[in-house]
Image (tube, helix red, strand yellow):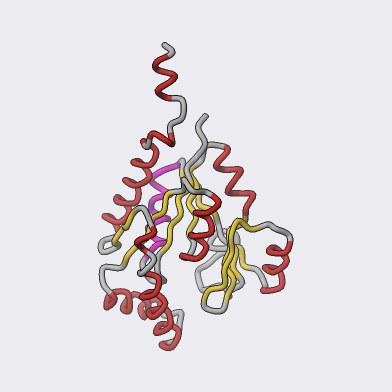
Amino acid sequence: MSKGILIVVSAPAGCGKDTILEQALKANDNLFYSVSATSRAMRPGETDGVSYFFKTREQFEEMIKNGELLEYTEYVGNYYGTPKKAVTDMLEAGKDVILKIEIEGAANVKKMFPDCTMVFILPPSFAELDRRLHKRGTETDDVIKQRLETARKELKFAENYDYLVTNAALEDAVADFLAVVRAEKCRRGNRPGVIEGLLAE
């Protein structure tokens, strides 16, 4: 059995990455979503262990100390990180693992897994991103302004990613993301032994 592929997904806040990934997971049952840990407060509608593993700052720092994280970073005053064991177990089981992480964490994962697939989700425009952030109604105007400034900085790193998916229409963005996964599954490097197996017949 072939190992799964590791797909790293990053996007500025408000670009719809959660919704895209939710739809992609429903459409492809070989995809496994790696739930991140965070020290930020839970938002309305979120569930511990599904949206994130919600930890106190002290609990998160204990995970860092014990080497339980694949990567971690501090972002807008909160810790975010990827629990290690679930990712490696699923890849060995042949599942294609999605990591939804910000750019610094993505760069760290790329160092450990040079063959990972990097996908950056873009907003159709900054005006639309501003509208979406306000529509969420979960943050103050000051926090939204900070997120938009952060988004501009993050976009400069999009050139380090393999694929860009623009989320103008959700259905198209989901289709584009699934097309990336399909293309990566066909990449020669991700199909070890296939040619040798045919030649051995």
Query: Seen from this angle, which residue lies furthest bottom?
Result: 142
127 or 119: nearer the viewer: 119
| Residue at screen point 52% across, 54% down | 111
Residue at 32% x, 57% y: name it.
164
In the image, residue 127 sits, relative to residue 164, either above or below, namely below
User: Where is residue 96 shown, x and y percent of the image?
Assistant: 48, 43
In the image, 201 versus 89, the foreground residue is: 201
> How many labels sit on residues?
0
Along the horizontal axis of the image, is 48 left or right of 131? right
**Apparent side of residue 147 relative to residue 36 in the rendered image (left or right):** left
Q: Is residue 33 left or right of residue 189?
A: right
Q: What percent of the width, then of the height, locates residue 139? A: 45, 82
Magenta span of residues:
16-29
| Residue 137 position in % (x across, y down) | 41, 80
In the rendered image of this protein, does residue 105 appear above or below residue 76?
above
Q: Main secondary structure of the magenta part?
A: helix
Q: Position of residue 78 (x, y in %)?
A: 58, 75
> Which residue appears at 28% of the width and 55% of the height?
171
17 in the magenta segment: yes
The quarter of the rendered structure image containing the C terminus is: top left
Rendered image quadrant of residue 15:
bottom left
**At x 43% / y 20%, what residue is drawn?**
196
